[in-house]
């Protein structure tokens, strides 16, 4: 039985993780960390939990095997370091922290052999979308990514969009878009062409009607290829989260990024 603490347990994703973990026969929820909801109760299949505002004390008390973090970008790195120092393996779904910073945290804080698994996106469809886009990237002159999320998303561009752009840029081996970038933006309209991630334009859309979507548009003379993925419910992330929880303790490498590694795609 894998003992699990959920960080950000009262958030949009955290509540889904709590439910999924508590219903899994091989997992057991043992604690909930939600500092903005200190003292509130979370009732699920594994019991009645009081939200803690002291992660260090919680980890020391319940001694979990794994912590899942879906919190906020400004606090996620600190949460990760706290768990690693306790020898607790971490599954990180909070985006907004660079891979370099996360690796630094793991190298400094994992003295007890704890692993850190990070995924920009936990939906299998999004992972496949990124793999398809990487495969196609070298065959097109221009690539633009449009990511669309709900108004509550705390970071822009999304971690999925950044990771997609980097994967495609790697496949393109230094090839840049032929089309114009920010140099064509009219005075007073900075950002009209989005931002640039390793030579690929990325545009962020936010609106109450969206949950999580991404569209990759690739063009070359005479043809356009569009690849799109939509998550319409947060339950779509849970199979990937559960896979990560079950896999993180047995990773051959202590620091791993990407659900594709667990799906056998990389």
Image (cartoon, rainbow, N blue to C red):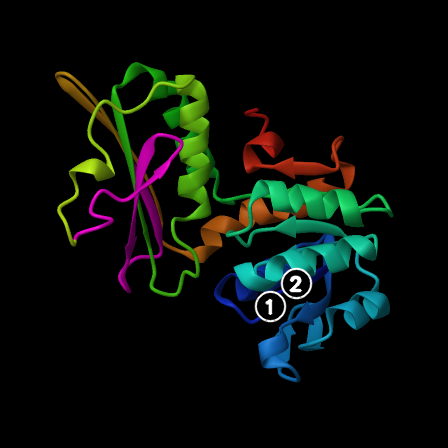
x and y, in percent, of residue 90 in the image: 70, 50
Which of 92/2 is in front?
92
Name the residue located 70 percent from the left edge and 54 percent from the top edge.
25
Q: Is residue 205 magenta?
A: yes
Side (left or right) of 73 relative to 190:
right
x and y, in percent, of residue 217 in the image: 25, 32
Residue 9 has which mark? Answer: 1
Q: CA distance from mark 2 to mark 1?
A: 5 Å
Which of 140/210 is in front?
140
Q: Seen from this angle, which residue lies furthest front?
A: 187
Q: Which residue is mark 2?
A: 6
x and y, in percent, of residue 173 in the image: 43, 17
Residue 40 sits above or below residue 90 on the image: below
Name the residue located 37 percent from the left edge and 27 percent from the top edge.
133
Q: Quadrant of residue 73?
A: bottom right
* Magenta-tinted stretch: 189-216
Residue 206 has which mark? Answer: none
Q: Is residue 218 magenta?
A: no
């Amino acid at each position: 039985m894998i003992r699990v603490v959920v960080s950000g347990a009262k958030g949009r994703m955290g509540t889904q993780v709590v439910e999924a973990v508590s219903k899994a026969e091989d997992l057991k929820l043992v604690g909930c960390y939600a500092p903005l909801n200190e003292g509130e109760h979370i009732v699920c299949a594994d019991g009645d939990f009081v939200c803690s505002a002291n992660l260090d004390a919680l980890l020391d008390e319940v001694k979990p095997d794994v912590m899942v973090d879906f919190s906020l970008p400004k606090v996620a790195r600190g949460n990760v370091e706290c768990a690693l120092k306790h020898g607790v393996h971490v599954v990180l779904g909070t985006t907004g922290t660079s891979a370099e910073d996360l690796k630094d945290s793991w190298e400094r804080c994992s003295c007890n052999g704890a692993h850190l698994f990070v995924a920009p996106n936990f939906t299998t469809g999004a992972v496949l979308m990124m793999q398809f886009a990487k495969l196609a990237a070298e065959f097109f002159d221009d690539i633009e990514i449009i990511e669309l999320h709900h108004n509550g998303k705390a970071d822009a561009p999304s971690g999925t969009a950044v990771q997609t752009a980097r994967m495609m840029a790697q496949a393109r081996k230094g090839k840049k878009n032929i089309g114009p970038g920010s140099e064509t933006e009219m005075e007073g309209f900075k950002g009209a062409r989005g931002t640039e991630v390793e030579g690929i334009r990325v545009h962020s859309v936010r609106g109450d009607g969206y949950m999580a979507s991404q569209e990759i548009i690739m063009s070359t003379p005479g043809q356009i290829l569009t690849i799109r993925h939509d998550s319409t419910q947060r339950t779509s992330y849970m199979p990937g989260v559960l896979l990560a929880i079950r896999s993180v303790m047995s990773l051959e490498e202590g620091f791993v990024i990407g659900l594709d590694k667990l799906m056998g795609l990389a």
